[in-house]
Amino acid sequence: ADRRLSGVVLVPDSPVGRAIASQIPVATGGTEDVFGHGVPERRRGERSGTAYPLMDGSVVVGAFVVLGPPLDPNAPMLDDLSPLITELGPRIAAARAVHDAERRAIADPLTGLSNRRELERVLSSASRSTASTLIYVDLDHFKKLNDTLGHPAGDAALKHVARLLETAVRDGDLVARVGGEEFAVWLPHTGLREGLEVAERIRRSIAEKPLTWSGAVYPLTTSCGVASCPELVGDVMNLPAAADAALYRAKELGRNRVEKAGSSH
């Protein structure tokens, strides 16, 4: 209910953290905040509370927090609260399992980005009436990096590039890993000119931020292919083939560059 708490990592010695660790309810004392120190500043009246652990069988899955002074053991509210807490644990565990399964179906396990399947789903539901751009990004000389430094370094490079790609786009854009060292960036409501600017920003960002591995610095470069609808491609579903062809041309012309799709695609 308090949006200021969204994304906050709770410290273990907070009342909530202690309730989860001990599996027994924990109430605040004095001026202590039930969510612990380091949370956004909240009024004194919002800080007191009791954290009740939520269990799924013998496994603790979270905590239910009641704000305000501790409840009297004979308080009528506890008659309603006890069955709610008992029921919430298994429900949260089940919901988390469904969420994790759905996430695995659409996410690349190494980088955490969306996968090709999710990109295809997004493209299939994209508006045909507004401009959109797809960028294919391929890590140059990736096989050489793998062969020279080993697969753990290769995995580190892929994750490094994934984070840089996420930084380069806006909320609402999609970054996916669609192959071994190949990524896709989907830019809805984006024309060719802006798409080329994003691709160039991606290329430059990766070239300027090398991989650090085992104390040494390894430069990375990428080649990018850009396809836009309707400026270069008439149908959204043809964007992947057009972007891939542009990417292949960028590789042929020397790598570490951005190429746009030909209008014949």
Image (cartoon, helix red, strand yellow):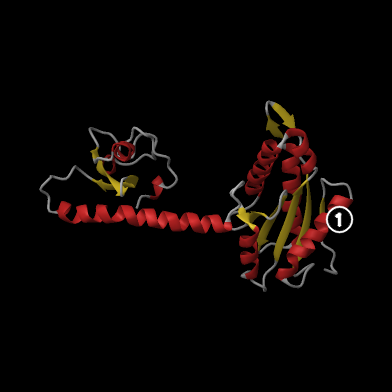
In the visual, does 132 lie left or right of 106? right
Image vertical order of residue 228 relative to residue 88, above or below: below
In the visual, does 139 lie left or right of 106? right
Image quarter (top left, top right, bottom left or bottom right) of the C terminus: bottom right
Q: Which residue is mark 1?
A: 249
Q: Where is residue 192, by image quadrant? A: bottom right
Residue at 89% across, 50% down: 253
Q: Nearer the viewer, residue 179 or 200?
A: 179
Image vertical order of residue 228 relative to residue 64, above or below: below
Residue at 64% across, 71% down: 127
Image x and y of residue 13, in percent:
34, 32
Residue 260 can be seen in this image = no
Dot 1 surroundings within 10 Å: few (below 14), some, or many (20 or more)?
Answer: many
Image x and y of residue 38, in percent:
39, 35
Q: Nearer the viewer, residue 18 or 230?
A: 18
The kind of residue on which mark 1 rests is: Arg
Which residue is the extreme one toward the top?
A: 215
Which residue is the extreme one toward the front?
A: 58
Image x and y of residue 64, in percent:
29, 48
Q: Where is residue 25, by image quadrant? A: top left
Number of residue marks = 1
In the visual, does 60 lie left or right of 71? right
Which residue is the extreme one toward the left?
A: 74
In the visual, does 206 lie left or right of 107? right
* Residue at disc 1, secondary structure: helix
Image x and y of residue 203, in percent:
76, 46
Residue 152 can be seen in this image = yes
